[in-house]
Image: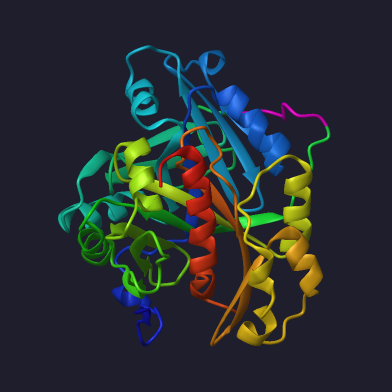
Amino acid sequence: METMTSPAVQAHPAQDFLPLNGTDYVEFYVGNAKQSAYYYQAAFGFELVAYAGPETGLRDRASYVLQQGKIRFVLTTSLLPDSDITRHVAQHGDGVKVMALWVNDARKSWEETTKRGARSAFEPYTIEDEFGSVTLSGIYTYGESVHTFVERSNYRGAFMPGFVAKSGLVPQQNPVGLLHVDHCVGNVGWGEMNQWVKFYEDVMGFKLLLTFDDEDISTEYSALMSKVVSNGNGYVKFPINEPAEGKKKSQIEEYLDYYHSPGVQHIAIATNDIRTTVSELRRRGVEFLTVPGAYYEDLLERIGAIDEDLESLKALNLLVDRDEEGYLLQIFTKPVEDRPTVFFEIIQRKGAKSFGKGNFKALFESIEREQALRGNL
């Protein structure tokens, strides 16, 4: 059953050997970065702010940096037929390679995590240009995913050295109210969840925040288990999912079948006005999962009084859940590429610190309907 650790995550600064200021950027390896950049600008309202490629002296790849609120996406494609990026895209499809973390000291972050058992992705190094310097280091996490530590207090440029400022590819682009990364969810293989929870606890000093078992997250056909880890100040949260036994194939198994390894399943993005945000995303063609109208019949009895009009939530198919701190509203996109892998969650928190346990059954039944259409249930 669901359990929440007590007391809430609050590491004393003196004990936090890996202080994190938040998510610096999320980097996707994709087949065509220019077209992907256009999609995220046109559909999700991101602004193109920086670019690196042959025109800037980078011979093997092209990268576009998109920003909205405090969110940075880096979309990278290979220019070579046999690079690590090309191989990654061939195996996984478009997907998240890097979850970069904003730190005050990238060298110390790398030293502290590698001495605790992290596998190094690359040692600390510093890059410079006329706008200052950035220090980077990296470690591997589940699958082929990487955490890059980014120290940028001495940099004032558009993104980092090697990139040039670049304006948008989409005329009259407008943001949709996306604010920051709320959490990133990873899918791992059978029996691997506790291993990776221990990694975040031992190697990165995270604390276990929540546990969901297969009784919490199950339907008639499938089930999964999940644990949520958080860093000391609560700025960075990583739910980690693994499959559980069920009558049919779970969404985690489908992801692993198509991604061909553990990896990032979805990115939850915060907004202060989910109705306006989702209305605009729908208008721009973003597709969302749906739940039956019956979900709303006893909604107010289950979650209590809310500020929003019930009919407006029903019209947008928004989900609502409550915990001891307040309530939240959330909705999930369909996968944003042809493989049924990466998708996004849009979330508005009105006090709630949890992750929508009360919506799990409705959500996963919705996912199963999509799996059945793909022939993968």
Does the stretch in magenta take in 238?
A: no
Above/below status of 353 relative to 318: below
Residue range (magenta): 165-171
The number of numbered discs placed on residues in the rendered structure image is 0
Above/below status of 287 relative to 160: below
Which residue occupies 29% across, 54% down? 108
Q: Main secondary structure of the magenta part?
A: loop
Above/below status of 15 relative to 143: below
- Relative image position of residue 331 (x, y in whole percent): 62, 59
Q: Quadrant of residue 105?
A: bottom left
Say how the picture is coloured: rainbow
**In the orientation shown, which residue stands out farthest toward the right?**
172
Q: Quick one: 112 or 246, which is closer to the camera?
A: 246
Which residue occupies 26% across, 39% down? 121
Which residue occupies 45% across, 70% down? 234
Residue 150 visible in the current orientation: no
Image position of 272 (left or right of 106): right
- Relative image position of residue 138 (x, y in whole percent): 31, 44
Image position of 144 (left or right of 294): left
- Relative image position of residue 73 (x, y in whole percent): 55, 41
